Amino acid sequence: MKAHDLREGTRAAALGGWTALVFLFVFAPIVSTVVFSFNADRFPSLPWGGFSLAWYAAVLTDDSVRRSLVNSLIVAAAAAAIATVLGFAAAYVDYRFRFFGKRAYMALASLPPTVPVVILGVAMLTFEGRIGLSGTLAGVVAGHVVLCSPFAMALVRMRLADLDRDLEPAAWNLGANAWTSLREIVIPFALPAIMASLFITAAVSFDEYMIAWFVSGLNETLPVRVLAMLQGQVSPRINAVGSLVFAVSAILVVLAQILTRRKI
C-alpha cells in the first residue's frame, strides 16, 4: 500500500510540475509585458533601469489611444448587451421547443466562432459596405455581435440544462402566461449565466482585432490602435497598453467564471 501511495504521489507531483511548466510557458510573455511596462528604460532589458509609471502616463495622455479605448469600451458594452439577448433567445428556443431542423438551427447558431476571423472580417466588410455600415462603430458592433452571440448561447444553455422542464407548464396550469413564466421562472434561474455572458462577450469583443481592423475605418478600437503603433517604431508604451488590455480582459473573464459557478 505504501509503495502504491508513493507511486500515486510521485505521479501527482509530476503532473502538477508539468502543468505548472505549461502555464509558465503560456503566461511568460504576458508577465514580461507587465513587468517591463514599469521599467524606466526605453528598451526591455535586465536589470531594470528603475520603476516608473511614465509609459502609463504617456498612454493615458495620448489622444489616439484614449479615443480608441473609448471606442473599444462602447463597442464591447453594446456588443455584449445585444449578443447576450440573442444568445439567451437562442438558448431558450433550444430548451423549450422541439421542431424539425433543430440540429441545423443549433449548428448554424454555433457557427461564427468556427469560421476563421479573416474570412469573417472580409465577409463583414463586403456586406456592411453594401448597407453603409462599413467604417462606423455600429458596423464593428454588428460584427462583434455575430462573433459573440454563440458564447452567450453556450453559457445560457448550460444553465438552462439544470432547469426542470415541468416548472413552466406547472406555472401555465396555475394561470401564468408564457411571458410571466419566462420573467418569473426562467430569467431568474438563468440570471448568473446571463450576467456571465455579458462579461465574457464583453471580453471577447474588447480583445477582438481582425473584424474591427476590416470594418472600423477611422473609428479604431484599442487592438487596432496597438497594431498601428507597432507598425512604426517599437515603443515601450505598447507594454503599458498591453498590460491595461490584459487587466480589463482578465477581470471580465474572472467575473464571468465566478457568476457561472453560482448556484441559486
Image (spheres, helix red, strand yellow):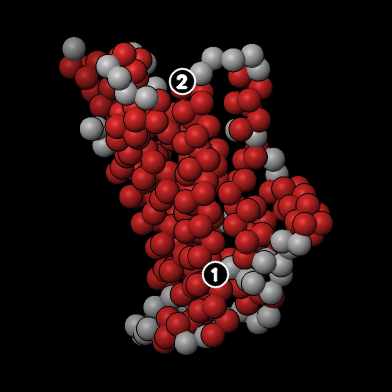
Circle 1 sits on which residue? 71
Image coordinates of residue 215 in percent, x first then y, are: 71, 61
The N terminus lies in quadrant: top left
Q: Is residue 8 left or right of residue 223?
A: left
**Residue lying at 69% horizontally and 49% vertically, measured from the top left:** 117
Q: Is residue 40 visible?
A: no
Say what secondary structure mark 2 lies in.
helix
Q: Is residue 195 visible?
A: yes
Does 129 sit above or below residue 63?
above
**Residue lying at 44% horizontally and 62% vertically, measured from the top left:** 246
Mark identifier at residue 96: 2
Q: Amino acid at mark 1?
A: Asn
Q: Amino acid at mark 2?
A: Arg
Say what secondary structure mark 1 lies in.
helix
Question: Residue 221: which quarter of the image?
Answer: bottom right
User: 147 or 100: which is nearer to us?
Assistant: 100
Mark closer to the chain start, 2 or 1: 1
**Residue lying at 65% horizontally and 17% vertically, measured from the top left:** 101
Does 37 sit above or below residue 249?
below
Image coordinates of residue 30 in percent, x first then y, are: 46, 61
Q: Is residue 74 left or right of residue 133?
A: left
User: 182 or 45: which is nearer to us?
Assistant: 182
Separation of marks 2 and 1 at Cα, in angstroms: 37 Å
User: 119 or 164: which is nearer to us?
Assistant: 164
Residue lying farthest to the left in this orientation: 2
Image coordinates of residue 130 in percent, x first then y, are: 81, 56
